[in-house]
């Protein structure tokens, strides 16, 4: 995990834009999205389900593949899980006292898998449509890459979860830099985000970019600080208390590195 400095100005750009937009990832918590999904009378329910599905389907797909299901069955079960959540209104009444959102989602998925024979019967009768068109080839490739080191389905789920978070934060940071006219800077420096500070080859990068080493160090420091700030905010959205963020960071990166 990179040892970027703590960001004391994490809200500087994180809440820009329309807070009701489906692309404004940082405007609300995932528990708020759960509430929207549970309220079938709300026009926001469908959009909330779509965001939840697009965010978390790959960790669930990796989990069910490691559980021994075929690629085709994993596709059906992952799609069916999200379709069932909305169809049966299973999220009504759920509240943040459930704790970590990733733990809640996995528990709900396991409950669904325990009753999968009912789902399969419905599927044969033509039930359970596809709520979203998803890139299954990408999911299978990621599953293969993350699963190379083995491990339990739960561990693989956590690894896929943190990769999903990092991808989302990286995309958000790229958007911010592009909006500020710094897309080129981001493209040149993004490789530094997951390195320890002592591993960054500043002299070589200075020659490649044409920047002085001093200017390069400042640019990398700012980018890493912003990246860490956005990551902490995204993780905070999945928790119920702000003081859980550091522990969750340690837990997730331990899972990514195959520890714990």
Image: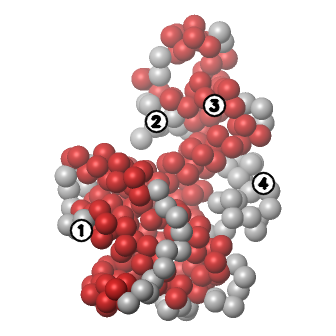
Return the disc, 4 or 1, that comes first in the chain's sequence. Answer: 4
Q: Looking at the image, which is closer to me, 183 or 6? A: 183
**Alpha carbon distance from label 1 to label 2:** 33 Å
Q: In front: 201, or 163?
A: 163
Residue at 64% of width from left, 78% of height from top?
A: 46
Using the image, tell me which numbered label, if any, was put on residue 104. none
- Tell me the quadrant of the picture where the C terminus can be found: bottom left
What whole-number distance in Å separates the C-alpha atoms at marks 3 and 2? Answer: 13 Å
Reading the image, the residue beneath label 2 is 194
The crowd level at tag 2 (other Cα within 10 Å; few <14, some 14-19, many 20+) is some
Where on the picture, by quarter, is residue 214?
top right
Which residue position holds label 1? Answer: 69
The residue mark sitting in front, 3 or 2, is 3
**Above or below, 157 relative to 144:** below
Q: Disc 3 on helix, strand or loop? A: helix
In primary-sequence order, the first of circles 1 and 2 is 1
Residue 16: mark in rendering: 4
The one of 143 and 15 positioned closer to us in this rendering = 143
Q: Which residue is mark 3?
A: 186
Mark yes or no: residue 204 visible: yes
State whether residue 1 is above or below residue 197: below
Query: Alpha carbon of mark 3 to alpha carbon of mark 4: how far?
Result: 19 Å
Q: Nearer the viewer, mark 1 or mark 3?
A: 1
Mark 2 and mark 4 residues within 8 Å of each other at the beta carbon: no
Q: CA distance from mark 4 to mark 1?
A: 42 Å
> Considering only order in the chain, which callout, 4 or 3, is on the residue closer to the N terminus?
4
Q: Position of residue 199 (x, y in %)?
A: 42, 23
* Residue at the limit of the structure toward the front, as seen here: 125
């Amino acid at each position: 995990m990179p040892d970027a400095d703590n960001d004391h100005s994490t809200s500087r750009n994180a809440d820009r834009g329309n807070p009701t937009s489906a692309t404004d990832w940082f405007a609300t918590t995932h528990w708020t999205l759960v509430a929207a999904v549970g309220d079938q009378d709300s026009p926001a329910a469908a959009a909330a389900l779509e965001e939840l599905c697009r965010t978390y389907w790959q960790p669930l797909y990796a989990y069910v593949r490691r559980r021994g299901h075929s690629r085709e069955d994993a596709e059906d079960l992952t799609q069916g899980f999200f379709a069932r959540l909305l169809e049966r209104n299973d999220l009504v009444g759920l509240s943040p006292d459930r704790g970590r959102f990733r733990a809640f989602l996995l528990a709900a998925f396991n409950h669904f898998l325990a009753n999968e024979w009912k789902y399969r019967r419905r599927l044969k009768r033509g039930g359970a449509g596809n709520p979203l068109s998803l890139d299954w080839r990408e999911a299978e490739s990621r599953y293969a890459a993350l699963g190379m080191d083995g491990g339990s389905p739960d561990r693989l789920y956590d690894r896929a979860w943190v990769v999903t978070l990092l991808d989302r934060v990286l995309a958000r940071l790229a958007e911010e830099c592009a909006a500020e006219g710094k897309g080129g800077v981001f493209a040149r420096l993004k490789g530094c985000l997951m390195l320890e500070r002592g591993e960054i080859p500043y002299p070589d990068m200075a020659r490649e970019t044409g920047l002085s080493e001093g200017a390069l160090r400042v640019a990398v420091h700012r980018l890493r600080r912003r990246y860490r700030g956005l990551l902490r905010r995204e993780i905070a959205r999945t928790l119920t208390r702000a003081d859980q963020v550091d522990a969750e960071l340690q837990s997730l990166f331990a899972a990514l590195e195959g520890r714990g």
